[in-house]
Amino acid sequence: MDKSQINEIISRNNIVDVISSYIPLKKSGNNYKARCPFHDEKTASFIVNESKQIFKCFGCGKGGNVVTFLMDYEKISFIEAMKRLARRVGMSVQVSPTSKYKNSKRDLIYKIYQLANAHFQENLKNHGGLAQRYLQQRQLSQQTIDEFQLGYALDSFGALRSYLLKNNINSKILGQTGLFGSGSNGFYDLFRQRLMFPIHSSSGNVIAFGGRVLDSEQPGGKYINSPTTDIYQKGTELYGLFKTKYEISKLDYVLVSEGYMDFLRLYENGFHNAVASLGTALTDQQIKLLSRFSQKIYILYDGDMAGRKAAIKAAGNVLKQGYEAKLIILPPEHDPDSFLKAYGKEKLEELIARAPTLIEFLHKDKSMEMSRKEKLEFLIEVLKKVEDDLSKELLAKEIAETFGISQATITSKARTRKRNNFSQQQEKPENLYSEERLLLKLLISEPKNIKNVAQTLKSDYFLSEKYRKIYELLIDKMFEIDNINVLIGEMEDEQIRNTLTDILLEEMPNTSIAEVTSSLKIRQLKKELQQINLELQNGDMNENLLKRKAEIKKEIIKFGKKIVTRILY
């Protein structure tokens, strides 16, 4: 895939059209805005600029173009994102083995996870007697094991590491994969003697693992889960969604369980519209992900007190997002796995058919030992955080009718003064008017000037590390910046990408490149002059120092008398 092809694909995909196919955008002046899909927030701080074809969140700082949005939202590689965008506009993309395209770090980590998954699956077949016996005890079919690619991590500190090195993976990347720990002898396998559950993104890429202990004497928790990496963040993914998203859309409701085995038992019994929240409380990010396929979310957690409390909290989070939440309450001694084994599919279908809403459940429930007042206080706190006005009104009406209270009373109790966080979030970025930032802004808008500036201005003139990195990047890519969007899409350093997006969204300064470069040169000369004066004050009357001091003063004088007065005295 060459630059011209990348450029064409990006130019033919309007960022507003692409992003609005994932999240709702509202017109706001010259921009579009929404609640950010990359972090939890109540006030819209996610901006899409159509004229510059970039997005920026003033809450979490994430920014980029149509390619990076797709990469981050779908958890896919650069090449996969380009292929999707190409298909969207009727183009075909061919990446040949001799392509000049260089795999990014994210692409490489995806490849490593693909290799690791194959390694663990092979281990289960050939060396996983302990894991196979466990799966037989849990009555899991071979078809399900194969379909969800379960595997086994050997009882070894170096088996996976050796396997990856044999497959031409550079050892330098291992520490960034989340698959290894680091000790005095280098990297060692993090997952050892565990049943391995690969976690897939909604698009089907393996992005993380969960490893279950098989020996009760083994150190560590019952489960070890992958840490945050470039391709995975805890609380943003749902186990099994890559397989069940189409059935969820078709049936227009989803069953949310807690653990791997609960999900697999549901799937085996024909509930192909299920997911698991990976043992965590159901997060706003997970709810947003589910809402792309259905806005009717049924919580199916363990039947004990802890499970019921977690289910109520999860349902409350669903309601806060403006979606429909129902609770499937199991007997206290059961989880979804054990319930299905004990009672079968039809019995669970009956529970699903008569599943109450959160409000209905709380109104009738006595098992939670909550007073009527406590139940209403909980629901009113949920209501306070509902942003959508229509959803808020409908929820208030349901609470009022169910509990026999006037809707006006409920609405009054839930009334909160909205804070205008958005204006606070748009505070000027760090060093907004610094010479360094101004120069970058001017060079990005007029890339033809990069070569001339680079000949006279060294990168060490930049005091800000991130601005220096951007300056060096502009110099390195000076002959490729006919489209800044291509550069943003290929940028691996997220901090640099976010800063560059910031700069692109700012207004152009009323100054010239010559003025700004002069200012930076003077600052550098002043810095050298201060160092010389310090050495002279310390008694070093070196003749070369005195000579250099005189030369610096002459150089500064060339920039004008007003500047000389400010710098020298």
Image (spheres, rainbow, N blue to C red):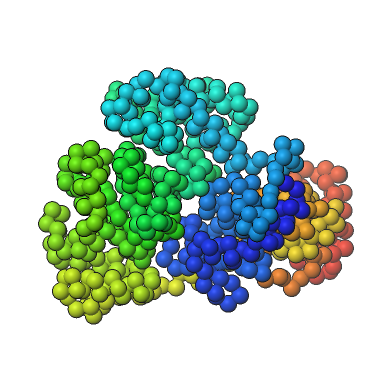
Residue 403 vertical position relative to residue 64 in the rendered view, above or below: below
How many numbered marks are there? 0
Q: Residue at image x 19%, y 45%?
A: 304
Tell me which residue sits at (24%, 71%) in the image: 398
Which image quarter holds the C terminus? bottom right
Q: Quadrant of residue 523?
A: bottom right
Would you say residue 108 is visible in this rendering? yes
Q: Is residue 528 visible?
A: no
Residue at 60 percent of width and 41 percent of height:
107
Left or right for 407, reference 207: left
Residue 266 vs residue 515, the one in the foreground: 266
Vertical comparison of 491 with 444: above or below: above
Left or right placement of residue 14 versus residue 274 in this view: right
Where on the picture, by quarter, is residue 102?
Answer: top right
Q: Nearer the viewer, residue 132 or 59?
A: 132
**Toward the viewer: 229 or 166?**
166
Residue 473 image point, x, y percent: 73, 50
Residue occupying the far bottom of the picture: 408
Q: Position of residue 51 (x, y in %)?
A: 66, 69
Between 417 and 119, which is closer to the camera in this rendering? 119
* Position of residue 72 measured from the top left corner of the image (x, y, whole percent): 54, 52
Q: Position of residue 294 (x, y in %)?
A: 39, 59
Rendered residue at 41%/66% (across/down) = 42
- Describe residue 544's horizontal placement relative to residue 321 as left or right: right
